[in-house]
């Protein structure tokens, strides 16, 4: 079934309710590289409830996880990859909450037959009890098998430009061989990341790590190097996914800081590729 632009743009998606607990918060932190060294006392507050538990800011991407839209949109779900992700944290993320999410399709771009389509979505997440807006997630979905439906091709947001100087800091995080399996317990259970046969059908030699898992590792790197492990300092976090990461590889995050703006990109030295590019973090004072 081909993309129906008018239908998707007019789609009215019902609000959905979700709940997450301190257990989910600790599990997410483990899934994005926190706690790899059990003697690192700076990371214990993210993975140990008796140490004044903190939430990694990018957990905002999974607290209301629902990818059913992709499978009901008419696009070829097997050929879908995550293009970009941004979050705006309107307040520091609580370590547990009951939330209500509202998602909409912002725009769709047609790159042409054989070149794919780009869908932009936005999800606003509120605290159920107070109605307070917690975060806004914006995602770009690259539907590799769905170009040529007749939509416009130009107008997608421009990526953040990285500084041209050498990075101010570099943080290397080794992923686990079972990283994708562990991260799947926080939400993204797409078999592409767990089933070797599904990965092969999608053109990969083995399952790849979820893009948002790499994204979370980048956030862990920024927390370590720039924020002194204070998640409340991160107000915005965005990046563009440019290459897959395989479990067991090293994510090397290069970081530039210019006042309240932090730029970053993630390199994979084992293959000499950039996994996340044009990263931008907005800091609170």
Image (spheres, rainbow, N blue to C red):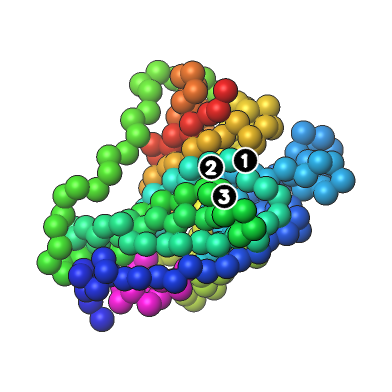
Which labelled disc corresponds to residue 92?
Answer: 1
- Secondary structure of the residue carrying numbered label 3: loop
Q: What x and y, as percent, mark residue 164?
A: 36, 21
* Disc 3: which residue: 132
Nearer to us in this view, 149 or 8: 8
Residue 111 falls inside the magenta stretch:
no
Few, some or many residues within 10 Å of mark 3 (<14, 14–19, 20+):
few
Query: Mark 3 vs mark 2: which is more N-terminal?
Result: 2
Nearer to us in this view, 176 or 40: 40
* Disc 2: which residue: 89
Q: Quadrant of residue 127?
A: bottom right
Q: What x and y, as percent, mark residue 152?
A: 14, 57
Few, some or many residues within 10 Å of mark 1 (<14, 14–19, 20+):
some
Residue 184 in the figure: left or right of residue 263: right
The reply to whether dot 3 and dot 2 touch (C-beta < 8 Å) is no
Residue 127 versus residue 274 in the image, above or below: below
- Secondary structure of the residue carrying numbered label 1: loop
């Amino acid at each position: 079934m081909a993309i129906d632009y008018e239908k998707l743009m007019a789609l009215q998606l019902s609000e959905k309710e979700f709940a997450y607990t301190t257990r989910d918060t600790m599990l997410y932190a483990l899934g994005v590289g926190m706690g790899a060294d059990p003697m690192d006392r700076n990371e214990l507050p993210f993975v140990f409830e008796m140490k004044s538990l903190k939430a990694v800011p990018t957990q905002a991407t999974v607290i209301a996880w629902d990818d059913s839209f992709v499978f009901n949109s008419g696009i070829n779900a097997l050929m879908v990859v995550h293009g970009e992700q941004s979050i705006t944290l309107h307040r520091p993320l609580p370590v547990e909450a009951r939330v209500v999410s509202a998602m909409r399709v912002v725009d769709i771009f047609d790159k042409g037959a054989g070149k794919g389509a780009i869908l932009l979505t936005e999800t606003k997440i509120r605290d159920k009890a107070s109605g307070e807006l917690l975060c806004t997630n914006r995602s770009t979905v690259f539907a590799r098998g769905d170009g040529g439906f007749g939509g416009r091709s130009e107008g997608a947001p421009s990526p953040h430009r990285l500084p041209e100087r050498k990075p101010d800091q570099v943080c290397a995080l080794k992923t686990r061989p079972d990283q994708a399996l562990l991260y799947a317990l926080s939400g993204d259970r797409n078999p592409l990341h767990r089933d070797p046969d599904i990965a092969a059908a999608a053109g990969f030699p083995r399952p790849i790590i979820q893009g948002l898992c790499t994204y979370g590792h980048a956030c862990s790197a920024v927390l370590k190097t720039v924020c002194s492990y204070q998640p409340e300092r991160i107000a915005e976090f965005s990046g563009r996914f440019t290459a897959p990461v395989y479990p067991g590889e090293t994510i090397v995050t290069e970081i530039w800081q210019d006042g309240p703006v932090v730029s970053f990109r993630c390199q994979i030295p084992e293959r000499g590729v950039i996994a996340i590019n044009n990263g931008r973090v907005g800091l609170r004072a």
